[in-house]
Image (cartoon, rainbow, N blue to C red):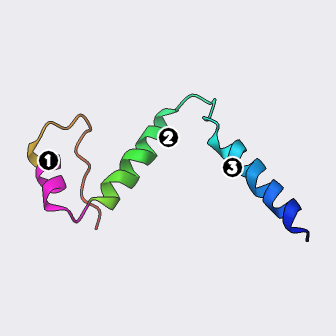
Amino acid sequence: MEPEQVIADIERLERTYALPDPRPLQPRDVDAANHFHDQRLAHSPWFRLWRDFGLCCRPKAEPEF
């Protein structure tokens, strides 16, 4: 494969993915983002304090075992 073609393909993909997603967010998208965020911070004591005692707009989920 030609290096110029590879570079052109990469630049085209970069331009494509730099554009904002025109689709409106659905409730399941927000739930998935919140879940991902919570899982990423689950081991942080500060996050647990905020989630358990702070102002949290999300309903408290039941613990998963």
Instruction: Tell me which numbered mark, 1 or 2, is placed earlier along the sequence.
Output: 2
Q: Position of residue 40 (x, y in %)?
A: 33, 60
Quadrant in the picture for the N terminus: bottom right
What type is the residue that disc 2 sits on?
Asp
**Would you say the residues marked 1 and 2 are in contact, meaning their CB atoms lie under 8 Å apart?**
no
Q: Name the residue at the bottom extreme.
A: 1
What type is the residue that disc 3 sits on?
Glu
Nearer mark to the viewer, of 1 and 3: 3
Q: Residue at x 52, y 32 (%)?
A: 25
Q: Position of residue 12 (x, y in %)?
A: 77, 48
Q: Position of residue 26 (x, y in %)?
A: 52, 32
Pointer 3 residue: 14
Quadrant in the picture for the C terminus: bottom left
Residue 29 circle label? 2
Quadrant housing residue 44: bottom left
Q: Which residues are magenta?
A: 42-51
Residue at mark 1 to residue at mark 3: CA–CA distance: 37 Å
